[in-house]
Image (cartoon, rainbow, N blue to C red):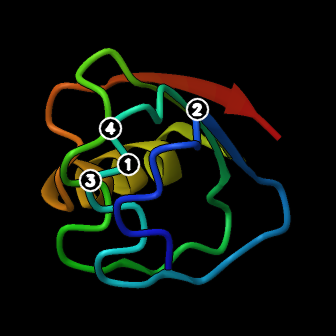
């Protein structure tokens, strides 16, 4: 986990993952660019993205819009309520 790791400004999770652990990026306040391959994403832990930059952009790479919508819902619930989301087919 990278709780309060202020040096992060971007994160790329390119390998397909199934879970983002609770609190994974909590209070990484400089984190502004996140890219996630969400094709296999099943869960996002509580407060995983709480405290990231209010100007964060989260790009979600997935096979279809339904998978994207589900990933956005989980990530927002995990604290990224003010982030801007982008869909990228892949």
* Residue 8 image point, x, y percent: 58, 43
Secondary element under disc 3, as helix, strand or loop, is loop
Nearer-the-camera pick, 67 or 36: 36
Report which residue position mark 1 lands on. Answer: 28
Q: Distance between the residues labelled 3 and 2?
A: 12 Å
Is tag 2's residue or tag 1's residue first in the polypeptide sequence?
2
* Residue 7 image point, x, y percent: 57, 42
Secondary element under disc 4, as helix, strand or loop, is loop
Q: Distance between the residues labelled 2 and 1?
A: 8 Å
Q: How far apart are marks 2 and 4 (CA)?
A: 8 Å
Report which residue position mark 2 lands on. Answer: 9
Q: Are dots 4 and 3 in contact, CB under 8 Å?
A: yes
Report which residue position mark 4 lands on. Answer: 29
Secondary element under disc 2, as helix, strand or loop, is loop
Is residue 81 depicted above or below 28 in this figure? Answer: above
Is residue 15 depicted above or below 46 in this figure? Answer: above
Q: Are dots 4 and 1 in contact, CB under 8 Å?
A: yes
User: Mark 1: few, some, or many residues within 10 Å (few <14, many ≥20)?
Assistant: many
Secondary element under disc 1, as helix, strand or loop, is loop
Q: Are dots 1 and 3 in contact, CB under 8 Å?
A: yes
């Amino acid at each position: 986990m990278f709780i309060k790791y202020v040096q992060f400004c971007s994160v790329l999770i390119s390998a397909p993952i199934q879970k983002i652990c609770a609190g994974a990026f909590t209070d990484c306040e400089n984190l502004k660019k996140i890219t996630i391959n969400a094709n296999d994403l099943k869960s996002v832990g509580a407060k995983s993205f709480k405290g990231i930059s209010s100007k964060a952009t989260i790009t979600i790479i997935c096979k279809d819009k339904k998978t994207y919508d589900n990933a956005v819902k989980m990530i927002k619930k995990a604290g990224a309520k003010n982030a801007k989301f982008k869909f990228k087919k892949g």
